[in-house]
Amino acid sequence: MKASVYIASSVDGFIATPTGDVSFLEELQPPNPDEGDLGFAKFLASVDVLIMGRKSFEKVVSFGRELWAYGDTRVVVWSRGKVDIPEHLQTTVSYSSLCPKDIIAQLEQEGCTHAYVDGGTTIQRFLEEGLIDELKLTRVPVLLGAGIPLFSNAGNKFALQHLETKAYSNGMVTTSYRVLNNETARETARDERTD
Ligand SMILES: NC(=O)c1ccc[n+]([C@@H]2O[C@H](COP(=O)([O-])OP(=O)(O)OC[C@H]3O[C@@H](n4cnc5c(N)ncnc54)[C@H](OP(=O)(O)O)[C@@H]3O)[C@@H](O)[C@H]2O)c1
């Protein structure tokens, strides 16, 4: 099963302020770049499940029912505890405390083919275990100075293959990468040697 990240950060690599505020995502002028949603609807249509950290889930729920951006897409909230799921989301949202590899394995067994992984710590843990295949990162033209980091300094090294970069009129820049984890990197090196 493929797993992808689709996320926006400040140029200095923060996805939210230290208190979890994400209003910097909305403060740009002009607010709507050339392609309104930065390809989000197309990306969302390509996934069959969203694995979201509990803190990110609580944040989006706090925005209110009308701003739930994921439609009927299945969502699995990652938490070690019990997650309060609002009644209107109970048909599509569940929660899991399984480790990243086991969540992916279980979803794969259930027929899922493409997972969207979201939330700072959540992305970091899945990435560290070599479970992320693609990163679609939007850099928002602001330096926050401090905040919740997109990436950890856990020390894992991954080569990234650049796929596409798109710059928008309001200064946002979206870049997509394929993650070459250790196994893939070894295979790529082997392929290159035999070319
Ligand atoms: N800029 C953007 O595009 C963007 C996108 C997404 C999110 N955000 C922001 O990022 C912030 C949240 O990110 P975050 O890094 O603080 O948290 P997060 O990744 O959303 O959620 C972290 C939670 O994941 C659960 N978790 C962690 N390790 C686990 C494990 N081994 N097993 C089971 N569950 C585990 C824990 O839930 P429990 O504590 O319940 O155990 C932990 O508190 C919010 O402010 C959100 O608005 C921004």
Image (cartoon, rainbow, N blue to C red):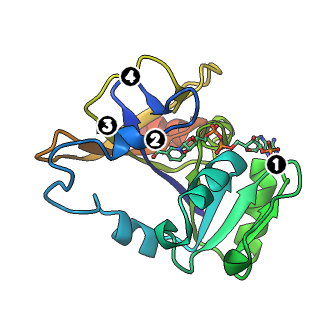
Residue at the image point whose x is 33% and y is 47% from the top: 26
User: At 85% across and 54% down in the image, what residue appears?
Assistant: 98
Q: Which residue is mark 1?
A: 99
Give the structural element (helix, strand or loop) at label 3: strand
Secondary element type, mark 2: loop
**Residue 178: x %, y % from top left:** 42, 46
Residue 141 placement, left or right of 150: left
Tell me the tag on residue 139: 3
Depth check: give the residue in front, 153 or 71.
Answer: 71
Q: Quadrant of the N terminus?
A: bottom right
Work out which quarter of the rendered image holds the C terminus and state it. top left
- Give the image quarter of residue 28: top left
According to the picture, the residue beneath numbered tag 4 turns out to be: 12
Type of amino acid under label 4: Asp
Residue 182 position (above or below residue 76): above
Residue at which label 2 appears: 22
- Secondary structure at badge 1 equals loop
Type of amino acid under label 1: Cys
**Which is closer to the viewer, label 3 or label 2?**
2
Compared to residue 79, the image places residue 171 above or below, namely above
The foreground one among 162 and 99 is: 99
Q: Earlier in the sequence, mark 2 or mark 1?
A: 2
Q: Nearer the viewer, mark 1 or mark 4?
A: 4
**Ligand 1 quadrant?**
top right
> Of callouts 3 and 2, which one flags the residue occurring earlier in the amino acid sequence?
2
Q: Residue at x 56, y 81 (%)?
A: 72
